[in-house]
Amino acid sequence: MGMAPVTFLSSRSWLSSLTIWGTSLLLLGLLATEVQSTMPLLGKIALALLCLLLCGLLLWIWFGTFYRITSSTLSYRSGPIHGQIPVQQIKEIRLNTYLWSGLRPALGPKGLVVLYNKWDEIYLSPLDQETFLKTLLQLNPDIIIS
């Protein structure tokens, strides 16, 4: 019998907040002004679809970025980006660092870089890093924390 899944929300930086909410409000403002313009109806519909799809994607990332640990996997999701890492494949977790390239399903700074398999790495930013690490270490005590 495995453990119950534990879900961790991503921390959020002021920059990611400003980027997501600012862009969404800017797009909705643009849409509101252009709908009242003399633009042809087809153009208004195309612009509305584009703005709403982009806002939807940004808000999906904002509200849909989290991590879930089960007895065997670490799952991550950030909007349309998602995946699973077998907990036993995690080799090392680097604290308070940032991954400048690669997979980053995270909204916050000073997160964790999880090294798994032979060459794979991913940047995560759980809001409660301490509980996140304790949960992973209970499942795989061989993980190196650096």
Image (cartoon, grey):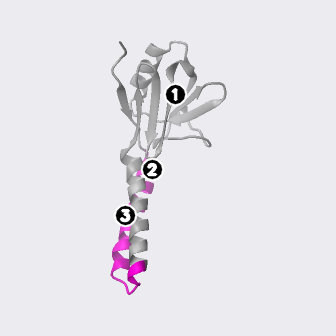
- Disc 1 residue type (three-letter): Ile
Distance of mark 1 from mark 3, alpha carbons? 35 Å
Q: Is residue 117 magenta?
A: no
Give the structural element (helix, strand or loop) at label 2.
helix
Of marks 1 and 3, which one's residue comes earlier in the chain?
Answer: 3
Circle 3 is placed at which residue position? Answer: 25
- Disc 3 residue type (three-letter): Leu
Give the structural element (helix, strand or loop) at label 1.
strand
Please give the count of numbered marks on the rendered protein. Answer: 3
Q: Residue at x 41, y 43 (%)?
A: 12
Distance of mark 3 from mark 2, alpha carbons? 14 Å
Of marks 3 and 2, which one's residue comes earlier in the chain?
Answer: 2
Circle 2 is placed at which residue position? Answer: 16
Mark toward the viewer: 2 or 1: 1
Indicate the position of residue 9 as horizontal and vertical percent values: 37, 36
Q: Is residue 26 magenta?
A: yes
Which residue occupies the foreground of this view, 38 or 145?
38
Indicate the position of residue 128 as horizontal and vertical percent values: 39, 29
Circle 1 is placed at which residue position? Answer: 85
Return the residue found at the far bottom: 38
- Disc 2 residue type (three-letter): Ser
**Crowding at mark 1 (Cα within 10 Å: few <14, some 14-19, many 20+):** some
Q: Residue at x 54, y 36 (%)?
A: 123
